[in-house]
Amino acid sequence: MLADRAGWHTIPRLSVPENIRLVPQPARSPEFNPIEHLWEELREKTLANISFSSLEDLENTLCTGLNQLADEPHRLRSLTDFPYLRITSCNAN
């Protein structure tokens, strides 16, 4: 399991099951967390400089931005699809 080591994601004592291995990410490494690029895009293109009057307005605007990204797979891929993050299946036979 990847652990980003953000201060708010840590606890003094963490009990990790034997079948789980924690792999710490380097500090401040958004390249290992593609969702960070997606959120940055949404903040800059969809949510910037807007004051929402309700949570519903925020949700609607966010959904609009996500739908726009979904309509442009090449753009979405450019934000989240990094070759070094791809997981390949292994044939144990």
Image: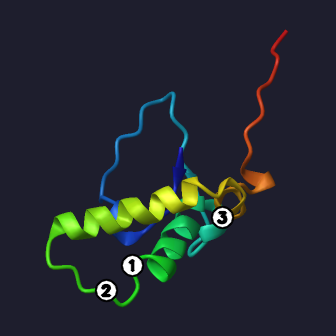
Left or right placement of residue 50 versus residue 33 in this view: left
Q: Name the residue under label 3.
A: 79
Near-viewer residue (18 or 84): 84
Question: What is the total number of numbered labels drawn onto the structure image?
Answer: 3
Near-viewer residue (48 or 26): 48
Q: Is residue 18 above or below residue 69?
A: above
Extreme residue toward the left, this view: 54
Q: How crowded is mark 1: few (under 14 residues within 10 Å), some or many (20 or more)?
A: some
Q: Position of residue 92 (x, y in %)?
A: 81, 14
Callout 1 amino acid: Leu
Q: Where is residue 38 in the image (x, y as percent from the top left)?
A: 54, 65
Q: Residues within 10 Å of mark 2 (few under 14, many from 20)?
A: few
The secondary element bearing badge 3 is classed as helix
Question: Who's the residue at 44% across and 76% down the image?
Answer: 46
Of the two numbered discs 3 and 2 on the same chain, state the one appearing first in sequence.
Answer: 2
Q: Position of residue 70 (x, y in %)?
A: 56, 53
CA separation in Å, label 1 and label 3? 17 Å
Extreme residue toward the top, this view: 93
CA separation in Å, label 1 and label 2? 6 Å
CA separation in Å, label 3 and label 2? 23 Å
Q: Mark 2 points at which residue?
A: 50
Left or right placement of residue 41 versus residue 72 in this view: left
Q: Mark 1 points at which residue?
A: 47
**Label for residue 66?**
none
Callout 3 amino acid: Leu
Callout 2 amino acid: Ile
Question: Who's the residue at 59% across and 55% down the image?
Answer: 71
Near-viewer residue (1 or 81): 81
Question: Who's the residue at 75% across and 57% down the image?
Answer: 82
Of the two numbered discs 1 and 3 on the same chain, state the one appearing first in sequence.
Answer: 1
Q: Where is residue 40 in the image (x, y as percent from the top left)?
A: 52, 75
Near-viewer residue (2 or 70): 70
